Amino acid sequence: MPQAERTADDAQQIVRLHLQLDRPEPGAPETLIAKLPIGLAQNRALGEMLAVYEREIRFYEELAGDVPLRTPRCYFSAMDPHPLAGREERALRIFQKIPTWVLRLVLSLLLWISGRSKRRYVLLLEDLAPARVGDQIAGCAPLECERILRELAVAQARLWNSASFEPLFWLARTNLVPRVSHLMFRRNRHVFLEEFGHRLPASLDRISEWLDANGFALMDHLASPPLALMHGDYRLDNLFFGSSVDGAELAIIDWQGVGCGRPALDVGYFLATNLSADVAAESEQGLVRGYQEVLLAEGVSDYPFEQCWRDYQLSKLFLLYRFMMGIHLIDLSHERGQILLDRILERLRALWPTGNLDALL
């Protein structure tokens, strides 16, 4: 019977299992990491609605072997069948057609049901300890950001516009459920404005109006070619550093948000929420240019810097859109969550979108 150490994040329980083998086994791990859904209804609803548990399991089962990034080895994965297995695309088409007032009711009902889901999921993954895990609260300086973005660019270049993306229905794009996303944005943006508006620039009201008018176009643009693999939560807390990880520069965990989209999506997400605020403004363009130059060196020929920079700016707007859409679903009652949110708001303010937003699209 294994001993266990248990922690939790917003949508999942993470358990370190200390294994007691009944006989010697050369090369067998002494510990494993188990990932399970969280029991808190509010956060479980978010995980089920966004299909994050299923998406991560499918990533390890169907895609991880093709991804040129160091990821934890998956020893075992399992989940209960999806209630709509084989009918997901049909369900999405229905969502796109029903009247908005019905969609509001359905969405509220689905959130309530999702928070009480009994569907089971489990992942048993390699324990990357004692590699050093990043610290998003501390943030990182430009030199470390450059190194992290280089790894991302190399991986994206090798799966650039990959044909393997197309049959993977679970590999989400930004416009997978645009009406649902925009409805949640409209329902919840006033909460974001009331709670955080005083900590962000005065143009937040103007930007939220722009997002309301252009949300669908923004989602469509970021889901259009060129397409690259998108981690979806590319940040320091999900990165491991150190020679203990097979000599790799870094290893990436937490693939719950994996998808495909415009390459600069992960770049904007990473810099706007991890780059130290005191050096952000003077460093961002150089970091984005360095990232794009790595893409060129790896053989990408259809992503000029002007387009990359424009997509990077749009990715910051999409980050705001996501925050306004779903931040109310995340439990931030624990101390670290509050501190992390403070740091993210500081960094967002330092890299605030400016200029003619219409010109970006």
Image: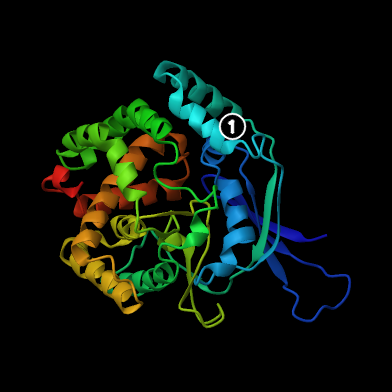
Position of 339 relative to 275 (above/below): above
Q: Position of residue 319 (x, y in %)?
A: 32, 47
Identify which residue, 35 or 263, lies in the foreground: 263
Residue 308 lies, in percent from the top left, at 25, 61
Snapshot quadrant of residue 39 = top right
- In the image, residue 186 above or below residue 356: above
Q: Position of residue 82 (x, y in %)?
A: 66, 39
Q: Which colour scheme is used?
A: rainbow
Q: Nearer the viewer, residue 297 or 188?
A: 297
Decide if residue 162 is on the left or right side of residue 128: left
Q: Residue 58 appears at what percent x and percent y?
A: 61, 54
Q: In which quarter of the image is the N terminus?
A: bottom right
In this orientation, does residue 196 appear?
Answer: no
Residue ID at (18%, 62%) = 306
| 55 sits to left or right of 236 | right
Compared to 175, does 124 lie above or below? below
User: What's the residue at 53%, 62% (across, down)?
Assistant: 253
**Residue at the extreme right of the image, as rendered:** 22
Asked if residue 306 lies left or right of residue 238, the reply is: left
Q: How many marks?
A: 1
- The residue under the point 46% across, 21% down is 98
Q: What residue type is labelled 1?
A: Ser
Is residue 155 in view? Answer: yes
> Dot 1: within a 10 Å radius of its alpha carbon, few (fewer than 14), some, or many (20 or more) residues?
many
Q: Which of 351 and 339 is in front in this view?
A: 351
Q: Is residue 188 above or below residue 55?
A: above
Q: Which residue lies furthest to the top in this view?
A: 101
Q: Which of 245 and 132 is in front in this view?
A: 245
Label 1: element kind: helix
The residue that label 1 is drawn on is 114
Q: Write down the quadrant of residue 152 in the picture.
A: bottom left
Report the residue at 54% width, 47% height from top: 169
